Amino acid sequence: MLKGIAILFLLLNTLMGLGQSNPRDEFNEAKRLMSNQQLRSALSAFELLKTDPQLGAHAYFFKGLCYSKNSDYKKAIDNWEVIEEKFPNWPEQDEVFYWLTLAYFELKKYDAALNFLDRYNAYARDTDFSSRVINKYCTDLSIADLLEHNRAHPNYRQLSLILARKLIIEKDWSDYVPVVNQLKSKFNFTNENLINGELKDEFASSYAVAVTLPFMFDSLGNPNTVIRNKVIIEFYQGMLYGQSELKSKGIQLNFYDFDTQKSQSTTDTLLPYLNQADLIVGPLYAGPISSVKSLSLKDSINIINPFTNNEEFIEDNPFAFMFKPKSKTIALKLAEFVAESDTNKNVVVFYQNERDSISGQVYRNYLEEKGFNILGFKRLDENSSKLLLDDWIETKKVYFTKYEADSISEIVGRKIIYTDEVSDYLIDQETGKWLVAYEDKFIFPKDSINHILMATESSTVINNLLGALVNRDEKVSVYGYGNWFFERTVNYELLQKLNVKLAVDDFIDKETLIYEQFRDDFISEFHQSPSAYHQLGYEFIIFMGDMLNEHGKYFQNSLNMDLMEGYLMEGNWYPGTRDNQVVPIIEMQNFRLKRLN
């Protein structure tokens, strides 16, 4: 804007050259006084020129600048608003609106300031100035004020960004989710846009890791609680084992354990102790997640969930990460694999609940784009899957004349049954011919479906569907999520017979030398074989230790990275995402699990 003022000076000098010498000399002298910060004298000189027919508007304008330089914004405004009233056609109106905007902001009269900013932008469309001035004067406004100003002036990106940032760090911010989502959609905000300020790499000789899990320490005297909590204890044991290995490599992680008790109120009491953490592991349940999310956003602390596939954990929090892929990522990676490797185009997708339907829809949409035919998208529960099994294996008799039966019996794969007793003979009511043979046919034609996705983790539904396929001797590709091969209640023989292919987010090849060494070392340390959760805890903390060591506290600065090979598992890949993009697809071949992608 200094450039604008300089142009204004040149314009005035030109005008002066065309007018009388005395007013011009007086005006030049007034400008000199203002430039030398002799503001009282400059004000007097400009006052004398206010009635000049050529210089009146300029005199009011520069008199306002003098008052502004002296921080007397009310008098500055009085002079600038005269220009709008007395000189509405003055060609430098945008300069007036610019300075009126700043003056009203300085007086904390935000409605007037934003109104004049609107008028200034009608001339100049200076989005850079708008963002700067809004960021300077509006950052510390209350949510109530920001909401009001944003409703009145909805098209300022920076105003909307400040509001969104304020809303998501509110303790009870869930009430504002629709507003935040609307702002994100309108201005294409990413979660990273919502971070307050730029993150700087922070490295340390050791890192404080707050472990916020439902340890349920107060209840471990109850055998039922111990059994239910076995997963958490084993996971934490795996973390401790990994911690000791990291320490031997010079990577120091200090664990601070906080028992959330699955309770939001309990978690709230822990928050004052968490704000010094470099990393927060967990929490696992909705209430504690909500509390820790607010702290994470407010104090810029990364949190990571090692268990969940639910993307709600990372939604609207740029500091939140998932060690596993989210459900949609798993569905998409499986669909990409299928599109490249399976030529069977007739597809049916079965799902059990709303969450399964969302991932099933991701799978469906991708394959439809690749030319697959989605014949069905059907919800099944344990009862309806049993009925489906009955329907699929139910047959009916189709009768033929002897001529028809003799012809069909020569077709490979067709099985014609000739009747032996006269009582079995039927007569075709239309032709009057004897029907002397029949063929059993499925009510649902065999091989009409080439490809099935089972988007469910229910072992009952899985077994019912697999049983139906086996009884039909169906030639069909079967895909699913989760490691059914280690689910005791799933029929293992059916999985092998049907060559089921599964997307498994925590697959470990247990026939490698690395795993065998880990298992032997773990047994020597703890006198028991490592469970799946021991392995998960170990893999998780080894990954996090390496990330903190290589990239610092704000490891997301380096998340556009290549694949990081895992130790026991298949690895981690975060190409600008906040959930892991590595999704192994496995199949049983010759009684061994093999990764296919």
Image (tube, rainbow, N blue to C red):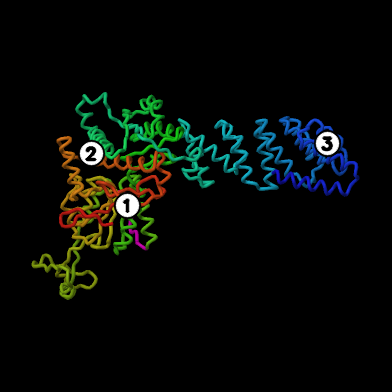
Residue type, label 3: Phe
Residue 56: mark: none
Q: Which residue is mark 1?
A: 378
Q: Which residue is mark 3?
A: 46
Residue 155: image x %, image y %? 60, 44
For numbered disc 3, what is the local secondary structure? Answer: helix
Q: Quadrant of the C terminus?
A: bottom left
Residue 534: mark: 2
Mark-to-mark CA distance, 1 and 2? 37 Å
Q: Quadrant of the N terminus?
A: top right
The relative height of residue 448 versus residue 302 in the rendered view (above or below) is: below
Which is nearer the eye, 129 or 482? 129
Which is nearer the eye, 404 or 566? 566
The relative height of residue 577 versus residue 235 in the rendered view (above or below) is: below
Q: Residues within 10 Å of mark 1 (few under 14, many from 20)?
A: few
- Helix, strand or loop for the magenta stretch, by majority: strand
Q: Would you identify the image quadrant in which residue 86 lies?
A: top right
